[in-house]
Amino acid sequence: MADQPQRDHAADGSVHPSARRPASTVPTTIRPATLADIKALAAIEASAFRSDLLSVRALKHLIARANAATLVHVASGGSISGYAAVLFHRQRPAARLYSIAVGSGYRRLGHGVALLLAAEQAAADRGANAMTLEVRADSTAAQHLYATHGYSVCGKQPRYYADGTDAWKMRKPLLPRNHAADAVSELKEAHVIKA
């Protein structure tokens, strides 16, 4: 599965800094996904992506495999509002953000940012020194989200997605585990818009 294209990260990428609420006001529960979450994850896939959707079988594989971390965001009412899947390779020091998606009723609330930060922490916890991802070249909102959180473009993948759209490859260095929490706090404070 690591050789398959990563899908459109625009699911929650439309969060503009002026629309973002401070992270402290977003109720956040993030936990590892379980097979009991499959139905909710499939529904999020259907609402978030127009192509390159993960099948139920692929979602089950992401949850069950040892070289992946699949996390879910649980909204205040108990519903799963989004997920992130990170892949690890024993012979590569960088983790790969394979997919991140937020359901249509939960976008622009900071759930995608919370998932991104949790995915980065999961990668750091597993010893990754960087996170890589691919993002649709036509999704400027998603590109902005990643750039705002420290990702930089490191390449281009022509015709990467099933519909022929190119992808930008992006990368972010990750801090060692003991420094990551301080950096997340600083990052959250730096992106709060003060009136």
Image: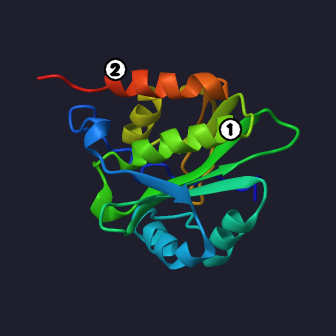
Residue under numbered circle 1 = 125
- Residue 47 position by quadrant: bottom left
Of all residues, the one furthest to the right in this rendering is 91
| Whether residue 91 is situated above or below residue 64 in the rendered picture | above
C-alpha span from label 1 to label 2? 24 Å
First in sequence, mark 1 or 2: give its number: 1
Q: Residue furthest left?
A: 195
Against 175, is 113 above or below? below
Question: Which of the two residues, 181 or 48, is positioned nearer the viewer here?
Answer: 181
Q: Nearer the viewer, residue 167 or 89?
A: 89
**Amino acid type at mark 1:** Asp
Q: Is residue 136 visible?
A: no
At x 71% / y 54%, what residue is drawn? 68
Q: Is residue 84 left or right of residue 24?
A: right
The disc placed on residue 149 is none
Mark 2: secondary structure: helix
Decide: few, some or many residues near mark 2? Use Cα within 10 Å; few <14, some 14-19, many ≥20.
few
Quarter of the image containing the N terminus?
bottom right
Please state the horizontal and vertical placement of residue 9, each as a whole percent of the image: 49, 49
Is residue 172 in view from this perspective?
Answer: yes
Q: Quarter of the image containing the C terminus?
A: top left
Q: Is 64 left, or right, of 83 in this rendering?
A: right
Q: Is residue 30 left or right of residue 85?
A: left
Numbered mark located on residue 190 in the image = 2
* Residue 108 drawn at (x, y percent): 28, 48
